[in-house]
Amino acid sequence: MPPSEDVTLLLRAWANGSRQALDQLTPLVYSELRRLAGIYMRREEPGNTLQPTALVHEAYIRMVGSTLPAWQSRAHFFGIAAHLMRQILVDHAREQHSAKRGGQAIHVSLDDHLAAAPQQEADLIALDDALERLAVIEPRKAQVVELRFFGGLDLEESAKVLNVSEVTVRRDWRFAKAWLLRDLAQSRGAGS
């Protein structure tokens, strides 16, 4: 990966309408997006029909086809990519769920980043719903989860995207993990 300053310059040029910048940017960010999608997809249960390449392509198509934000940095770009990947995965899970008429939805393993207990699984739709509830009361904490869990950003990159300190991101991350685990457990208990 080239220095983040190079990527940021290309992102800004692309936002200003430079097709050449987009052509230069694509190979620079594609492999990172593919890596993040691969990490995320490995958390999914076997039998999922969505592949990492398809996830990256769909996210990229949505980015290229939308009104571009004023890119602040490489981390900002990957934060937006994380949000788009989350939307795509949840849409896919909802389609799968409705196609099966209440059958098994796509599941996500809440690995050690998000779970206190190993091998704990949560339904992707339930996780998205829980993140939406968290966003109502603690929007930044929900963004931290989205950046870290869906976007694969580290503490430093997340702090840059959110324009806060790493200590704040670490504190938000701990709070959000605990809150989500409690909320998901309560939701499961209410659904039983």
Image (tube, rainbow, N blue to C red):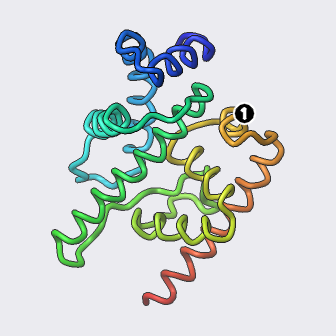
| Residue located 64% across and 50% down the image | 144
Q: Which residue is mark 1?
A: 156
Asked if residue 75 is positioned above or below residue 94 in the image, the reply reads above
The percent coordinates of residue 127 (x first, y second) are 48, 65
> On the rendered image, what quadrant is the C terminus found in?
bottom left
- Quarter of the figure with residue 114: bottom right
Q: Position of residue 135 (x, y in %)?
A: 60, 64
- Report which quarter residue 71 is drawn in: top right
Q: State the image coordinates of residue 167 (x, y, percent, origin top left).
A: 83, 44
State the residue at coordinates (81%, 40%): 165
The answer to which of 191 and 81 lies nearer the viewer is: 81
Q: Amino acid at mark 1?
A: Glu
Indicate the secondary structure of the residue bearing disc 1: helix
How many labels were placed on the picture?
A: 1
Looking at the image, is 94 positioned above or below residue 80?
A: below
Query: Nearest the camera: 82 or 124?
Result: 82
Mark 1 closeness class: few <14, some 14–19, many ≥20 residues within 10 Å: some
Residue situated in front as seen by the camera: 180 or 43:
180
Residue at image point 67% right, 61% down: 176
Q: Is residue 47 left or right of residue 78?
A: left
Vertical side of 152 occupied by 111: above or below: below
Indicate the position of residue 19 as horizontal and vertical percent values: 35, 15
